[in-house]
Image (cartoon, rainbow, N blue to C red):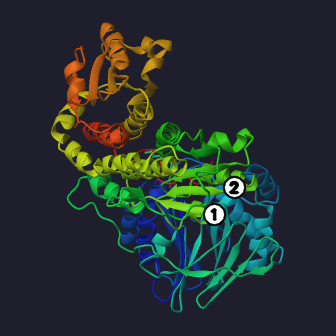
Amino acid sequence: MCGIVGIVGRTPVAPLIVDALKRLEYRGYDSAGVATIEKGRLDRRRAEGKLVNLERRIGEEPLDGLIGIGHTRWATHGVPNETNAHPHFSKDVAIVHNGIIENFAELRAGLLADGYEFTSQTDTEVVAHMVSREMDRGADPEQAAFRTLQQLEGAFALAIMFRGDDDLIIGARNGPPLAVGHGDGEMFLGSDAIALAPFTNAITYLEDGDWAVVRRNELKIHDMTGAEVQRKRQQSIGTSFLVDKGNYRHFMEKEIYEQPEVISHTLAHYLDFTTGAAKQIEMPFDFAKIDRLAISACGTAYLAGLVGKYWFERLARLPVDIDIASEFRYREMPLSKESAALFISQSGETADTLASLRYCKQEGLPIASIVNVRESTIARESNGVFPTLAGPEIGVASTKAFTCQLSVLASLAVKAAADRGKVTPQEQAGLIRQLSEAPKYANQVLKLSDQIEKLARELAHVKHMLYLGRDTNFPLAMEGALKLKEISYIHAEGYAAGELKHGPIALIDETMPVVVIAPHDRIFEKTVSNMQEVAARGGKIILITDRKGAEQATVQTLETIVVPDVPEIITPIVYALPVQMLAYYTAVFMGTDVDQPRNLAKSVTVE
Ligand code: M6R
């Protein structure tokens, strides 16, 4: 999940590399580093922690040179300190790496036996020494890189630089993405096109198994047999504009507040509010002809998919199998040839989701994906893409991408219902009218910020929290718990309210706040009973409901957050906001690093 950059440039590259790394910091921020070749000498600056530390370090001791590589790290092998920070060196070789070398222990043992000494605990240093060893045996840089790549197992993207050739970087991709940017007498490598956007929008994406010889005026790409291959050069739609926080304290806060607008854009992409019908979009399969839909995703995207299951099954009578992608990929599930597969991912690069996609592709299923990053690997490998129009999401905790994923899923469920003849045109128009109101209600919910912020001040002292919900509010309860734990580090669990008495009720005492997400719907009374069970054991209830629910909840609450009365289909979209705000303000009071919480990365490109 690290970010890598390489530049064979015309001007000093270190500031450009740092600039590109800023756009990749979402991939990891445990440490960062840059290496250049200057006057025939390999030099590097590395720093533990975020990129600002590296910038400070380079400010104190600048790096010159017209060629360089850079890295921002999410630690896998070895603690996040300066010694383990990339780039790693071995004699004349410098290397940055994203991913995991699975056979590194065995390779390391061989290198130790051959007398190579290790200064870090990383798997990356193994690769540096292997390239070096090939060169010691007489190989030129290209041969050395190729021979090394043939021995590596795992998922990785690499950039390798060689002292003695300041017109050469070798890039390699086996799993995690790698893009080559074409400049005018200069060439760039990056983990994504956005990183390279200020330099060029002419991009060539490497495919799995590709390795590239990148020089100022030449790009040659080879596959794993060593044969030269042609890859398309395309115009990137990535924007060079480094999104800023504006007047918000954090990206997460900004992204929460952007939701009315991005939900509206997303819905309008799929639904025609004038005619009251789903728009004609390019479909990789026909909803009327499939008998099942297999959805897989990770984290928040998985929870969006779980909400989608309720919608597809209820509205379109289409059975859905939903899986956490890391489980699905190894579950060897029998897949009916009449089914289709749908993958959900903000980044479009999540390793487990991508592996699940490839499994389904191999099984011959038509593949669709809901992605936010249009040029991502998942998007490129899908037969059809349903974009979320959330714009760049920078905060590690997903907010606007989630509600946009829900917006796409709701729109698709309505379309599926229409295509399968499960709703009349009038019913379809009614559902679409209801969906069109989601941005308005989301905006009204944002006005509850003072109340939620005040409540969060009290929660900042608790150790554990429980979230409960039924129906589509069950995935939302899990999403609330996920959001809270990832940014505030408060332990939280989300449960189906009906499951309370099957175990989690044992946790309830007067120190345990319980967030109950319960609009006044047909099962509201059932949830009221669960709240009574909590109250009877001294648990403190935070009820998120509507006006009617607040009136009819015959139970004492610590706080009742009253959101507007909304139609059932948009409940998960609208109720997601107070849940996100509660997590956000709690984390702010806790003083955590909201946008870049510890141990996490925005894009999880390793297993
Ligand atoms: O990029 P993806 O949507 O595939 O990412 C999936 C998860 O890693 C992601 O949703 C994660 O759970 C978020 N940090 C949650 O806020």
Question: Pointer 1: what residue?
Answer: 381
Q: Residue at x 45, y 48 (%)?
A: 414
Closer to the camera, 479 or 20? 479
Residue under the point 38% across and 67% down: 55
Q: Name the spot of residue 90 as percent of width and height, x first.
A: 67, 67
Q: Which class describes the residues within 10 Å of circle 2: few (<14), some (14-19), or many (20+)?
A: some
Residue found at the far top of this picture: 536
Q: Is mark 1 within 8 Å of ligand 1?
A: no
**Position of residue 114 measured from the top left corner of the image (x, y, whole percent):** 82, 60
Instruction: Say if mark 2 contacts mark 1, CB within 8 Å.
Output: yes
273 or 504, which lies in front?
273
In the image, taking residue 10 as reference, residue 228 lies left or right, namely right
- Which amino acid is tagged 2? Arg
* 47 is higher (above) or lower (below) than 521: below
* Any part of residue 37 in sight: no
Give SS at disc 2.
helix
| Residue 129, position as x, y percentages in the image | 72, 64
Quadrant position of the N terminus in the picture: bottom right
- Residue that label 2 marks: 358
Asked whether 387 or 301 is in front, the reply is: 387
Q: Quadrant of residue 558?
A: top left
Q: Is residue 605 left or right of residue 280?
A: right
Three-letter code, disc 1:
Glu
